[in-house]
Image (tube, rainbow, N blue to C red):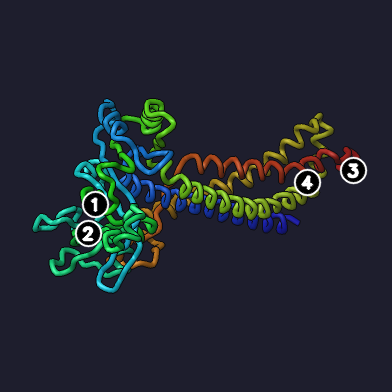
Amino acid sequence: MPGAIQIITAITTVGVGLITAALVVTFSVFNGFQAVLRDLFKSFDADVRVSATRGRYVKPQAGELARKMPESRAVAAVLEGRAVLRNGSKEQIVKVKGADDDFETVSDVERLVRFGRYALKDTFGEPALVAGIGVAGNIGLAVNDPFQKIEILTLSEKKELLTTDPAQAVRSAVLGVSGVFALQKDYDDKLVIVPLPVADKLFEAEGRRTGYEIKLKDGVSPDKFRKKLQELLGPDYRVETWYEQHQTLYEVMRNEKAVAFLVLALMLALTACNIVACLSMVAAEKRRDVGILQTLGGRRSLIGGVFWALGILIGGGAALGGMILGTLLCILQERFGLLKLGVSEDSAFLIQAYPVEMRPTDFLLIAALVVVLSSLSAFYPAYRATGFKIVENIG
């Protein structure tokens, strides 16, 4: 019997420890990817963005109001729309973002450029574009090639031109390519940044803008600034922080993390069931000792508490070892990148190994889960031990 108890205890301890380590590593990897995306988006997107809730364009007064606010460091006007990008016989529908000179201050896009440089003019002072790496690969863009000119085509919103003069209905611009950036698939495969005057011509905006992007001063809370600006602008405007612009993506990652937690928690619960078997065998083996304790005046609550504490000790000790193991694995991954993403160092990916970020809240959640499961697993053996009669125990 003692040998069986030791075997079951060892199996339980190892199982709980390994699953706890898996929880630590899994949570840390999800946190790492969230941190990478957060840093990338904050590098490209402004702290706060103003757009229209009705219609396409925002009034210039919105930008002027944002510039006058003491929390603002810089405000960039942007004009966005869809167009066809053509390089010879290759074409692709892209999202065109017209940006002014302040966009470099509002966004840290220069850090994301992998080939060439961020510049909306070429070396000859002519208009140039900066494209996502997916767009560049799809239609074969060459950086700083003086012989390659890329054509951008849009269709005029003046419907009468389609019947009276179809040739005039097509708006076009020819630009060079100054740089290629890599951020995230939705950006890389669709986005092209062009000078604001070029976008003005393509979309016949006549000075109107689809939004304003705001860079805040250090220490200013984007959420508080958003609420303040929203109250000033009213319901005709949508004011969003960089997080709210990508809230759907973060919600998806949060849900994936929750699903992973539930799966590993279920595995941990099944493993913790071994604590029931272990403590039940201990209770059966220690019946005589329990009887002696009862004759000495030991109450049922005391006897039950002993078995409950033993269950917590088994589960908690295993969890502590698992947390230490998981922490060591995360530290090794962070420093040496043991587990790679399977991409080459010269690829477009900004990271080559799985990122990790450990958070105290995750450790508290894991510890609470183990304590709850250990307590539930110890409840039945503790109840069974307190149910023995003194005569049966001593006899």
Q: Which mark is residue 201?
A: 1
Q: Label 3 belongs to which residue?
A: 392
Residue at figure coordinates x 46%, y 47% from the top left: 250
Separation (CA) of disc 3 from disc 4: 13 Å
The spot of residue 204 in percent (x, y) is 28, 49
Chain-order first, disc 3 or disc 4: 4
The spot of residue 371 in percent (x, y) is 63, 41
* Residue type pointed to by label 1: Lys
Separation (CA) of disc 1 from disc 4: 84 Å
* Residue type pointed to by label 2: Ala
Q: Which mark is residue 108?
A: none
The spot of residue 379 in percent (x, y) is 75, 41
Chain-order first, disc 2 or disc 1: 2
Q: Between label 3 and label 2, give the one nearer the viewer.
A: 2
Q: Label 4 belongs to which residue?
A: 283
Q: With 144 as the anchor, is 303 left or right in this view?
A: right
* Residue type pointed to by label 4: Ala
Chain-order first, disc 4 or disc 2: 2
| Mark 1 secondary-structure assignment | helix
The spot of residue 136 in percent (x, y) is 28, 65
